[in-house]
Amino acid sequence: MNAALRARIVTALLLAALVIVVLVWLPSDVAVAIIAVAIFAGGYEWAGFVRLQSVPARLAYAAAILLALTGAEMLAADPRWLTGILRIAAVWWLIAFVWLALRAQAGGRFAAAMVGFPVLVPAGIGLSHLVTLQPHGQLLLLYLLVLIAAADVGAYFGGRAFGHRKLAPHVSPGKTWEGFAAGMLAAATVAVAGAFVFDMPFWPWLFICELVALVSVVGDLTESMFKRHVGLKDSGKLLPGHGGILDRIDSLTAAAPTFLLGLLALGLVP
């Protein structure tokens, strides 16, 4: 086993242990605080896509993201505003899908600076409100992480075994349609298990989980698109073997608000 792979495995195990401890044994307020820190760190890394080089400039951009998140959280205390913010996020990810499909090589500093807000702010809202849902919010967030991981792992191994047709060659050459299909199948398997664990109506729950798995791919590819615009392999170096915070939460930025909106829209949570 080479050093890079060893570092990747150790980091993944440590992150998994931290997530389990926080979501299973600690109060939800701890998770909310960690989410805010992650969004701030994500904003700092996103500033690299805006071609901000100095630490003060990056910190200022991250602070603007956190300030926007704080304001959005105040508004989201009203359920109508919460639903509105989640719907805005849904519209953004639809725009991102079209962007990826038609104009993946387009986008400059101004576009990157603007896009950081609809990527990161609704993600923070979705995560923090999901984890505080009663009575199973923390377990629902843990389930969401497992769902996304299953889709990602399924896509990786499915792509390695069967992949031939490129999914998004200009953005992420390693992804294939065959891998995508395997990831969706893996997500469906986790969705079936989740329906029983949480005692959810089967078909609405399966629909939400598959939609979330689909949107998570858009989140992943969107970050990859902006990294390619500035010639970056990773968004940062904070996590050995994995890159930066954004490299770990790219799928989650799209999946979290989509998951919460789906649960609320179908009346599956209070």
Image (cartoon, helix red, strand yellow):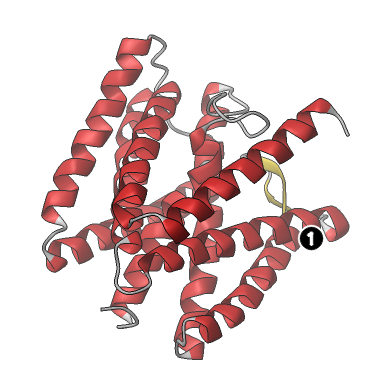
Residue 223 vs residue 42, the one in the foreground: 42
Could you tell whether 246 is left or right of 177 in the image?
left
Could you tell whether 118 is left or right of 10 in the image?
left
The picture quadrant where one finds residue 183 is bottom right
Give the amino acid at mark 1: Gly
* CA neighbours of label 1 inside 10 A, class few (<14), some (14 to 19), many (20+): many
Residue at point 46% right, 75% down? 208
Query: Is residue 24 shown to the viewer in this render?
Result: yes
Toward the front, the furthest residue is: 25
Residue at point 38% right, 15% down? 52
Task: Please identify the quadrant where the C terminus is shown.
Answer: bottom left
Where 198 falls versus 85 (above or below)? below
Callout 1 secondary element: helix
Could you tell whether 58 is left or right of 155 in the image?
left
Residue 2, position in %: x, y? 86, 29
Query: Is residue 98 shown to the viewer in this render?
Result: no
Residue 51 vs residue 2, the one in the foreground: 2
Task: Please identify the quadrant where the N terminus is shown.
Answer: top right
Residue at point 62% right, 76% down? 188
Residue at point 77% right, 28% down? 4
Residue 201, position in %: x, y? 45, 90
Residue 258 vs residue 2, the one in the foreground: 2
Where 131 falls versus 269 (above or below)? above
Residue 136, position in %: x, y? 38, 72
- Residue topped by disc 1: 158
The picture quadrant where one finds residue 83 is bottom left
